[in-house]
Amino acid sequence: MSRSYLWIPATLCALVAVSYASAAEKSRAPVKNEAPSISKQIDTAIEKRLADEKLTASPLADDAEFLRRVYLDITGIIPTPEKAAAFLDDKDPAKRSKLIDELLASPAYGRHMADIWTEMMVPRSSDNRRLQSEPLTSWLEEQFNKNRPWNETARDILMASGKQDENGAVTFYLANPTVDKMTDQTSKLFLGLQLQCAQCHNHPFTTWKQDDYWGMAAFFFKVQPDNIKKANKDDASPGVSETNKQGGKTKLPDSAKKLPPKFLLAEEAKLKPSEPYRPALAAWVTSADNPYFARAMVNRMWGQYFGRGLVQPIDDMHDGNAPSHPELLGDLTIDFGTGFDLKGLIRGICNSETYQRSTKTTEGNESDDHLCSHQNIKPLTPEELYDSLMQVVGKQARPQDKNNTRKGGPNPLSRVGFVTFFRGDDDNPDMIEYQAGIPQVLRLMNAELLNRGGELLARANRATDDGKAIEVLYLGTVSRRPTAEEAKRLQEYVGKHDKKNAYSDILWALMNSSEFALSR
Amino acid sequence: MNMNQTRRDFLRLSAAGVMATSLSGWMNVLAGRAAESGVKPRKSCVLLWMDGGPSHKDTFDLKPGTDNGGEFKPINTSVSGIQISEHFPKLARLMDHGAILRGMSTSEGAHARAKYNMHTGYREGQGGLVYPSIGSIVAAELGDPKFALPNFVSIGARSYGSGFLGPRYQPLTIANAARGVENLKAAVDEQQFNDRIGLLEEMEAGFYKDYKAGSIEAHQTTYHRAVDLMKSKEIKAFDLSQEPEKVRAEYGSDPFGQSCLLARRLLDVGVRFVEVSLGGWDTHQDNFERVKTLSAKVDPGMSALISDLKSRGMLDDTLIIWMGEFGRTPKINSKGAKPGRDHYPKAWSTVMFGGGIKGGQVIGKTDKEGATVEERKISTIDFMATVCSILGIDSNKVNQTPIGRPIHIVDKGAKVVKELLG
């Protein structure tokens, strides 16, 4: 399989070339078939381990399973019935690989990644109720769609200054406005490390000491995020700056220690008190030599596509927490660290047989949950569920729906309202666990918005016969055609009921089914 | 065999009714036996959660005549020798049914960690687990699994959930007592709704047959419960308009008071644990005005609840807990324009009514400033173990997490406050 970066548009080649030059020892000239592709590396490593453990791998997913899964994983929304039918009927043996390319090139990819990252970067706290997160989501969407090298995006986030309406990336600091939050988030999101325990005492099961924590936190001591409440009152865009006054109005927790800035388990930064601290941190975090950065993102992307990281939990990659496939993680980290090409990494993952395996278990592999003998069923995230449901009922989210700061909470009918309602309490929900409770399910069953028919139902009503109507309902919800048995049973149902109701009943059942709410 | 799958499968299959026949038959027999042998009815619990950490010196542990005693005066109660804040006149008359625990002494002073600790008995992140809150524990231990309503209902703010006990014991959260449970009515008539459910059941059976995953079971369990809820007669409990105006007025027109009334109605139909929250107690600034206002909401609601339960003969079987996540500083701060008090877990108060406790007493004593506990310190786990004892739950009982880790309901080393037990 050819190296992914051959697909990067010409304008980005220069950037890629620059980052290659700076990682001289790891640089490779773009040569076709020079070394095993990411997909091959993955499959080889996974299969070897399965053989060692004498585990049988499940067969590859059928086209319908693959279709819906890859649409959700890459773009966060199910395919339209036309797209579904087109893919299922396509006879091209390379259609899966082409679909992956098509989805990565679509703007929905960037939006989906931006949604995921906004959720992680903006914790839901009572303070953040007042903070607009859309500027961050838009900014991230742009970076992801341009496939900007991840180290550059990360650097921009860490160094972000200015007003939110001019630089959406500052939202990161506005949402995490104290030194300890900045440190915790930076470690989790960019280093894959849960440093927060070491804030108050030496970490119970790693080598990190409290001094290590405060050495990292020191880089943030000069960051000044504006007070959101005040900015809203003044009708101004809140901003972030780096001043020379340490701490400023930011209250430090009781556990705080004033130490000189020091890179985690590495040397002191040796910065002058008058210079800004963040550039040194950003450079260290995103450098080709940083032992955590590339690895953290590889693990996170693996988790996003497989439901479980090579290291689990995704962002707890300390020494005592061994990866399930250490060599594979190492190889993927080296690949990714050369150019930080996110789309390339995803392309490699999705083209692997390991990714494309069925979620159906086979003899002996039912209890495997980390060796990838089968894929994992993942419940749709609240955003994916909303967007997919809206596509079915034919409603486009209005721009003002993206505003999450409406007084009294977001409009429950809006995307933000729906997502908040479905999120639950857990800030780090397990990707494989089903989270919805009774109130959520009641809404799915009985909410007016989801019962008023819409786009897909209208198409069914226009179909020339019952069979075609049922088929379009299936294609538009669970992205497959009904089996012969299902079709027969449902046609019987239609025969026995008022046709107008029958179609909407079938649609209702499909929308409320596990098959809809889960990605198989 | 993977412990993970086995235990989860069992719980979920039985919950989803797949094993219903044998299990339900057995349970009816058990219930029948219990009734015959005169076994006591199971107890229920109402947690009145005072979010933000109420100042103990301005509610239930006043220190009149001291420099930082504050603006409120103590008043006598129906129990000679016990005095509480003047802003709880109705509660004062019911003191013979209540006990004040003035020796609370805990270790978390940050809201999130303290709330978590007081809801679960464990520290946030301890052992890398998400622990079940007391509501979920009570639902699991005392709730009837076939009951149409969830056994844990939370009114007001979202409570802490079921953690590793799983989605079966998640609370039903009601944001607003007056609005009740949203989306409880089907969008179509009953016949059509039943047809739809029938279709859904068929689709589910097919899908599960092919894929058999835990998340499918969880989805199905939740749907079954939701539909049971919609069809139950118990949902009438959510309709406050069925209460006479006089009763509604007694509880107080504030949402908190109406939530207490809703709690009583839920207890009437058999819900085991209701949590009602009232926020605003984090009085770093303007402590006295705010505590006065909040007390004025608590007093009618809480007393109406106690009196109502008493007149229905339910008070002995219903434990009412009044508490927040910590107390507030003995010294009054002068940070802002109006005086306030800050977080203080070292010495604070909780209050209990009903549940068969020995009422009319104060347990524990703080020093003259209300700063340290001089007698009868009660830690978080002591408190939790005591609540379990009162409710008839074995706090040493071990629950298994999904991967098979044994976790006691209450962590080891807890000492029950025996003085409370009747």
Image (tube, grey):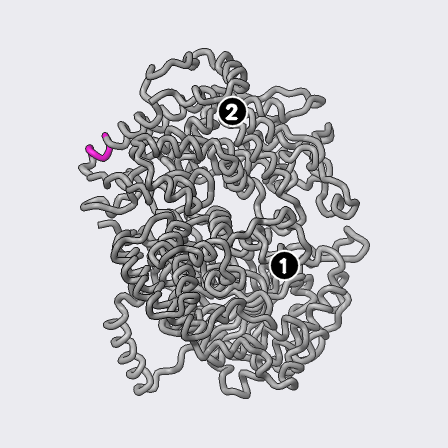
Give the main secondary structure of the magenta stretch.
helix
Which one is nearer the viewer's eye here, B81 or A490? A490
Question: Which residue does the numbered mark 2 point to in the structure image?
Answer: A149
Q: Amino acid at mark 2?
A: Pro
The quarter of the displayed image where residue A258 is located: top right
Q: Helix or strand or loop: what does disc 2 sit on?
A: loop
The residue drawn where x is 27% and y is 65% is B18
Q: How many marks overall?
A: 2
- Write down the chain letter for disc 1: B
Q: Which residue is mark 1?
A: B52
Residue type at mark 1 is Gly
Judged by depth in the image, the label closer to the viewer, 2 or 1, is: 2
B176 vs B37, left or right, is right
Q: Is residue B379 left or right of residue B137?
A: right
Contact (Cβ within 8 Å) of mark 2 with mark 1: no
Is residue A251 or residue B57 the one in the foreground? A251
Of residues B412 and A475, which is closer to you in this image?
A475
Check residue A49 for magenta coloring. Answer: yes
Chain letter of disc 2 in the image: A
Q: Decide: is B297 above or below A470.
A: below
Q: Position of residue B363 (x, y in %)?
A: 56, 71
